Amino acid sequence: MLLNKYLPVWVEALNLAWPVILNHIFTTLMRTTDMLLMGYFGPAAVTAVGLGDVWERVVLRIGLGLGAGSISLISQEAGIKERTGEQGSDEILTQIIITGIIIGLPFIFIGLFFSANLIEILGAAPEVVRLGAQYLLIILAAAPFRILTLISARALQGTGDTSTPMMVDIISNVINITLSVGLSLGLGFFPELGVIGIGWGTFWAKLIAGVLYIIIFILPGGNLSLEKPSRHWNLTVAKQLLLISLPRSLQGGYQSLITFPFNSLVLTFGTEAAAAYHIARRIQQQIIAPLHRAYGTVTTIMAGKKLGEGKPAESKKITLAMLWLTALTIGLLSLIVIYFAPDLVAFFTDDPVTKDFARQFLRVLGLGAPILTLYSVISGLLTGAGDTRTPFYGLVFSQTLFKLGMSYILSIFILGNLWGVYIGLLLDYLMRMSWVGKRFLSNRWSADADKLISARHEIN
């Protein structure tokens, strides 16, 4: 019964999802390679890269916020084109890319003058500060290109083209891995730069990816093209971009902000505990996150298009199908990760204390992965409808109360160990999923989409 009802949706979803999954696998493989390399240099290097990535995630979240506006509006336009023949995707793309580049430029200045301060305020040891500052300086210099690539990938995905972003990102990540390994270890003709080599690998990879996307948008015959900026932008489009992108960027920004005290909390249990947390997250990002992210993205693409076609019931059916697919696939994958946690951790470190902490963290993250993916799928539908506020409010409430507050109280004042952090993480996942689930059941997201679409096309 379940198979007959949802199989066509699953087939279409997986056809869209496999390039996204492969894309994320290569992206996370690049980050996993960085973590493996840092494991070679010791716990201080692992922590330095992990803390540098805490700040780099601010850039990531801004790019993902703009990407959310891009994929939401462009997927709706794809459905509108099917229904009426009208579309405004190129104008949307141009406005987002210009905005993204402008937002990315100040991060270069921040990296030049404040890298050491940004690592130091997280409570790191002097050696970690030194290594982390060198890494962060180069990473932040790549911010405009990082944001550009995120926007461009989401824009193309919104049209249903998930293959082109996959190819660009595979090229970028192969370059990143090659340069990171070569420059950090001094292989072949590369100089041995250590942590700095990993940063330079990332910088050049993001620069090349950004240039490739601009070329794709300039060449004729593609799904999307850059328009020459007009003196007067479409204010309705700009308003909707802000409406969708700002909550997602704020969500990501808050998520990054809450990560700072959370990392400091974990650091109170030692550098080994901090290194273990970053190792466990990297394994979870490599094995489970590609499916987790792809399911949310595919839900946005498919549901957003159906909303543009004026078929909200089909959008709801797609979301239900993706929720079942999550339970079946992510549930099984999580059990595998939990069972093989000790073996997976052993690839990253041979320090016994770090291994023990990492095994525990990985099992907690594995247990929470299906719950987090359910949240991602429902958030994907809401994003397709233009509602990024509900996931934002849910995340702020949940991460403040549970990930940080409950973790701190339990681990410091009640239990006196990391089990308080483990409990706080799981409660955070449950609350976030429940929050967006309530909105999904209300069906108010359909009216949200209708308002956005009507406002854009009343003026065309």
Image: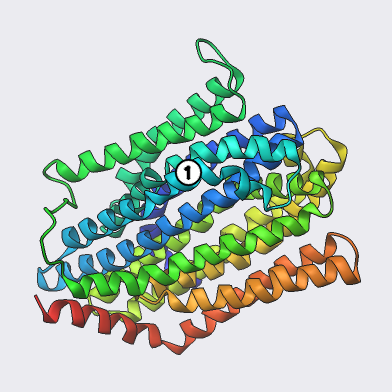
Q: Is residue 160 visible?
A: no
Residue at x 44% of width, y 77% of height: 389
Side of 316 relative to 93 (left or right) = right
Residue type pointed to by label 1: Leu
Foreground residue among 418 and 355: 418
Residue at x 69% of width, y 50% of height: 336
Foreground residue among 173 and 109: 109
> Could you say where residue 161 lies in the image, as x and y percent from the top left?
28, 51
> Could you say where residue 341 lies in the image, as x and y percent from the top left?
75, 46
Question: Residue 93's image quarter?
Answer: bottom left
Foreground residue among 325 and 118: 118
Does 346 appear above or below 300? above
| Residue ID for mark 1 | 140
Does 282 appear above or below 431? above
Helix, strand or loop at label 1? It is: helix
Side of 100 relative to 401 (left or right) = left
Residue at x 19% of width, y 46% of height: 217
Q: Quadrant of the C terminus?
A: bottom left
Does 384 appear above or below 267? below
Residue at x 25% of width, y 64% of height: 74
Side of 273 relative to 218 (left or right) = right
Asked which colour scheme the image uses, the reply is: rainbow
Question: Residue 249's image quarter?
Answer: bottom left
